[in-house]
Amino acid sequence: MDLERLIRPRSIAIVGATERASIGREVIGSLERLGFDGRVLPVNPKYKSVLGHTCYRDLDSIDGEIDLVVLCLGHRQVPSQLERAAALGVGGAVIYGSGYAEAGEDGQRLQAAITALCKDAGIALCGPNCMGISSPHARCHSYMLRLDDSEAFAGNVGLVSQSGSVCIGLTTDVRRYGFSHVISSGNEAVVSSAAFLEYLVQDDDTEMIALFAESVSEPERFVAALDAAVLAGKPVVVLKVGKSRRAAAAVATHTGGLAGEARVFSAVLRAHRAIEVSTLEDMSEVLAACQVRPLPTDARVGIVTASGGHAELMLDLAEGAGVDLPPLAPALRTSVEQVVGPLTGDGNPVDAWGNGDYATNFPVALSALGDSSEHGTILLAVDGFDGQPMHHGSIAKECAAIMGASKTRSNKPHFLLSTLRGVFSSEQITWLRQCGVPLLSGISSALSTIAKLVAYARPVPEQRPVPAVLSTERQSHLRGRTTVHEHDAKQLLAEYGLPVSSERVVHSLNEALPAADVLGYPVALKALSDGVAHRTDHGLVRLGIRDGNQLTIEWDALQDVVQNLSHEGAELAWLVQSMIAPGVEVIVGVKHDPIFGHALVVGPGGVLAEMLDEVSVRLLPLRYGDAQAMIEDTRLCTLLRGVRGEPAADRDSLVRAIESVADFAAANAAWIESIDINPIIVHQRGCIAVDALIVPRPLTYEESK
């Protein structure tokens, strides 16, 4: 569907136009202020003219082609007007009003009807329940609020938001950046956020994209648009809301609950190099930072400040923000101290106040950082605010000039930092924009913003190859099971390289005793059945059995438990398993997300899995280096290094184990719903999977026949 007639129309019919305070009045007035040179076509049978424009009785009365129809009407009047628009070959429509899918069954039926109508007629519909579109460079405006200053509003950020209020919030401040297009997509009955992303990726006026999403209706198209944005060199900044709570007890594996919709979506953004933020303030900071060219690619930051206190605070905050503040090299430090005087600490941040001659000191400090091979990004931290009641004399313009000169001398990304978040000098921003230096606000947010841009700049590695799938016959057998119990699950995973514990399946005490003798005590005794996923909850696991006498006692006790257990299906089998020495416990699992497919989950395992609720998630198939990165994402990296005198655990063996699970899941994705391996125990040398469960995807009706 072509969006050009929706976003850059040459003729706009405003149905329901009036000179009274209304959406129609604001749209027409904004078009006049923008200098729209196309046809403005008010439609209302009550008037002959509206705001100096000929007013038409109905759409049929208009001569010539109509690109866009904006419907300033109640929801009950919309269908008939859309039918006329379809008959006239209109290319786009905007429906502002509510009363559609968000309003219950009647609204859902109404939205379904207009969706079908628009798709059949090829009408690109924005909304319903939206605020419309403003495109200041194209001098087009179907947005329901008045645009007074198009020159200040125009910029390089393309904004797509399912929330109208978020559009209002983000467009209230255009001091640090402006907008190429503001698209309030609303219910997205016809044109999705993914389609708008596609358009903005191809748009010459757009250099970066901001997306506020409540849901993603076309996942494949969405990720393809993200990939296209990367190739076009346009950062996409995403804020997703409506994140699901942890899954309830009905989830058969820990993995499903630990992954969750939000974590899977974050993994999607990471895999396709979008920049995820969690607040509107963070989104605004990232968009401001993206105004710099080149974008920062180096997390080693050099900072110039005029405050020892700020320098100490920055050092405290840097590690948590994900950036590094390397010391100033001795030779460069000496050159700075010859002008500024003695520097505190290790020279970064550079406290360049010295004798208070900032006009001399700041350029010297910035020059040193520009020459340094240890610093890839440069910040100058100052304080200057609009309406500040007390100050020592304005240095705003001078600092802007100093930064402009430093950026000319060094091609490293430069940022001016206003240390208090959300407040800065508007006059200073004007000067900074002329020399290509963005202004960031708030120490912590500025440092984390730079870290986000550095992560964006890193190329995504290639995917690992997917190994061979199990035979069709074996898949069919597995698909028919409720779950694949521990022993069978581990044997399947072992075929793809996962090291698993030694064990024997038995059906009687007479089989269990010799099996334990062969394995060697101590052993574990576990019930084994597809129908009992969580055996510990039912008291069907016994650990640390020391000898045959204890095994006999535990066997008898478990038979009593089974008698009281409502268990459907085949008779329980039993697993005699070697006890594994303690080590670092890790959970590794797979969840099938209904929108984005299979995701791998890795985190601290055993009891820590639920205590910490801390996992890293990646989409499958894994990319090279993903397994190592997943370990670094969580406190696993600390546990593996050894705590309280414990030796370091074998990280390399864990990486191989993680990759083997990912390989199995990627190869057999067609029949797997989830996998739970908890724990894998990592020792000084090697690791072993102690427990596992596979949940097959349910058979479809056709498959079950």
Image (tube, rainbow, N blue to C red):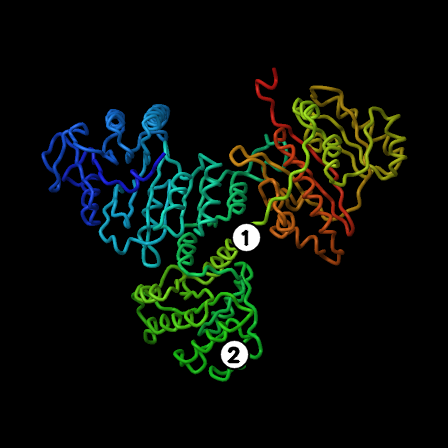
Q: Is residue 494 above or below residue 200?
A: above
* 604 vs 558: above or below: below
Quadrant of the rendering where the C terminus is positioned: top right
Q: Quadrant of residue 387?
A: bottom left
Q: Nearer the viewer, mark 1 or mark 2?
A: 1
- Apparent side of residue 335 relative to residue 502 in the rendered image (left or right): left
- Looking at the picture, which amino acid does disc 2 mark? Leu
Relative to 158, does residue 401 appear above or below in the rendering? below
Q: Which mark identifies residue 459?
A: 1
- Residue 78 placement (x, y as % from top left): 26, 28
Extreme front residue here?
64
Q: In terms of secondary structure, where does tag 2 sit?
A: loop
Q: Is residue 236 left or right of residue 623?
A: left
Percent from the top left, x then y, of residue 642? Answer: 72, 56
Amino acid at dot 1: Pro
Q: Quadrant of the N terminus?
A: top left
List the single residue furthest toward the top: 705
- Mark 1, Cα crowd under 10 Å, few <14 / some 14-19 / many 20+, is few
* Quarter of image, res 17: top left
Q: Residue furthest left?
A: 48
- Determine the image quadrant of residue 92: top left
On the question of residue 88 being in view, the answer is yes
Q: Could you say where residue 598 lies in the image, as x and y percent from the top left?
A: 58, 36
Q: Residues within 10 Å of mark 2 (few under 14, many from 20)?
A: some
The residue wearing badge 2 is 343
Residue located at (64% from left, 41% from top): 465
Is residue 95 in view? no
Q: In this rendering, would 102 be left or right of 60?
A: right
Question: Considering depth in this image, is 166 or 83 the residue closer to the camera?
Answer: 83
